[in-house]
């Protein structure tokens, strides 16, 4: 009806008196949903999530992670392969898909490993992994240090039309570092990780994508120099896309404060200059995607000395309000937010989402004025490692629907 704030689909949603229509075909929703003063968007897609199963079920399971995703407004997530065993076989790929279907919340699309066991030595059977349902290839958590291995992987990825998702980190430059290199690290007496350990690999992988023609996606961009390199590569027509995570556009190294391990992740939080560059990259389209890098860890792995603490924070249930804050701050439009959280990931991974054409409904109804406090008790994720604990945020998915079925309702 006319009270709906808007139906956002950068492609082709139209709205008509409470029904969702696209391409002149109505979507039949079994029950009446009151979307007065709400935004109706295509289901959000988080293309970078660590679900931890198999192997680390004490941190998160596929069921708890996909439940948390639905609560965050996501109808689909992509599961990174650094599980135990690593997702480097069709068996693990199929296991993840089946578990997520069984759980019945957000759908999990597996991302398979580039190298066997994430060891950076030999390539996996990409065709077989694709056949089993893997949508991309990544050694995320670790870089592919060998340029030759990355070149060969890209040659296969090109043929198979599978994006290579690169965790850009040059290990001799980042070695020993636990936070951003700079004045905060110096004050705290911690070893730093310089920006160049990321950007040098961004530049290498852009060169390899130019050589091979493979689709390259840069994971969790955190630096000024990476944004600049990706912008330049796109200008030159190289097949590169990029993502950042809400913590990189919301926080800086200052969040480490007095050794706060909830501000420790890889890559690390950077400076205000980097944060501003990321905002510019988001606004001008250099950064295509907002993904969470949802990385659950147990309290026992975070409640330790900063040096020893695990890298990563959860993100599924805070991404949408942090993204909506950028819209309120005038960084970009609500349409661009939905592009970066749904349509662009769908395009990059060739997923049947974002555009809901000829499919049953995957959609997210967002209340942009919904105020809530981030508290451990209200988070569905099994782990509670978030630097946003206690924050008062605005904007929430009040209903998430996957394949016409309600998987979350606030
Ligand atoms: O902070 C991180 N945590 N960065 C990564 O690349 C991996 C992730 C994890 O698996 O915990
Ligand atoms: Zn990750």
Image (cartoon, grey):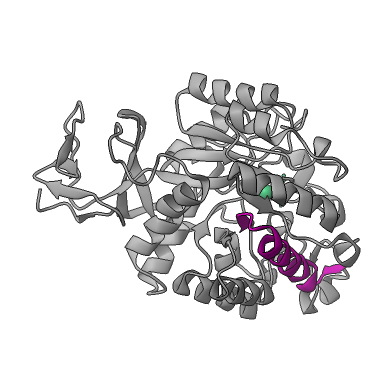
Residue found 79% across the figure and 79% down from its top: 183
Tell me residue 328's x, y (percent): 36, 69
Front residue of 78 and 383 = 78
Which quadrant holds the C terminus?
top left
Q: Is the magenta stretch mostly helix, strand or loop?
A: helix
Residue found 67% across the figure and 65% down from its top: 210
Front residue of 183 and 89 = 89
Tell me residue 24's x, y (percent): 14, 43
Front residue of 305 and 90 = 90
Front residue of 388 and 356 = 356
Task: Classify 224 as above or below 385.
Answer: below
Is residue 207 covered in magenta? yes
Tell me residue 96's x, y (percent): 61, 26
> Horizontal placement of 239 versus 113: left or right?
left
Task: Classify 99 as above or below 345.
Answer: above
Residue segment shown in magenta: 191-217
Task: Classify 261 as above or below 80.
Answer: below
């Amino acid at each position: 009806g006319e009270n709906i704030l808007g139906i956002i689909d950068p492609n082709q949603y139209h709205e008509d008196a409470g029904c969702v229509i696209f391409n002149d075909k109505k979507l039949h929703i079994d029950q009446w949903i009151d979307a007065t003063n709400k935004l109706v968007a295509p289901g959000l897609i988080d293309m970078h999530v660590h679900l931890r199963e198999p192997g680390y079920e004490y941190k998160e399971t596929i069921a708890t992670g996909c439940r948390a995703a639905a609560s965050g407004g996501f109808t689909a997530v992509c599961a990174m392969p650094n599980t135990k065993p690593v997702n480097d076989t069709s068996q693990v790929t199929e296991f993840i898909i089946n578990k997520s279907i069984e759980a019945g919340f957000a759908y999990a699309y597996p991302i398979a490993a580039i190298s066997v066991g994430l060891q950076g030595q030999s390539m996996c059977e990409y065709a077989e992994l694709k056949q089993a349902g893997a949508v991309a290839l990544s050694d995320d958590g670790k870089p592919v240090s060998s340029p030759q291995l990355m070149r060969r992987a890209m040659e296969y990825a090109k043929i198979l039309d599978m994006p290579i998702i690169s965790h850009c980190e040059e290990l001799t430059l980042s070695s020993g570092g636990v936070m951003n290199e700079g004045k905060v690290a110096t004050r705290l007496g911690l070893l730093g990780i310089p920006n160049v350990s990321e950007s040098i690999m961004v530049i290498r992988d852009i060169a390899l994508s130019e050589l091979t023609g493979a689709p390259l996606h840069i994971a969790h961009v955190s630096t000024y120099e990476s944004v600049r390199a990706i912008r330049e590569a796109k200008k030159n027509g190289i097949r590169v896309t990029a993502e950042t995570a809400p913590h990189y556009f919301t926080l800086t190294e200052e969040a480490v404060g007095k050794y706060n391990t909830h501000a420790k992740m890889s890559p690390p939080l950077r400076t205000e200059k980097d944060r501003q560059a990321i905002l510019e990259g988001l606004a001008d389209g250099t950064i295509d995607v907002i993904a969470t890098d949802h990385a659950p860890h147990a309290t026992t792995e975070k409640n330790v000395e900063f040096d020893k603490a695990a890298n990563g924070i959860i993100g599924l249930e805070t991404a949408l309000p942090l993204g909506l804050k950028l819209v309120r701050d005038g960084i970009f439009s609500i349409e661009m937010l939905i592009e970066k959280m749904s349509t662009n990931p769908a395009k990059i991974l060739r997923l049947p989402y974002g555009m809901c054409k000829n499919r049953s409904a995957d959609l997210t109804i967002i209340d942009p004025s919904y105020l809530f406090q981030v508290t451990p008790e209200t988070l569905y994720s099994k782990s509670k490692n978030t630097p946003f604990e206690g924050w008062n945020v605005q904007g929430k998915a009040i209903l998430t629907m996957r394949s016409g079925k309600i998987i979350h309702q606030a």
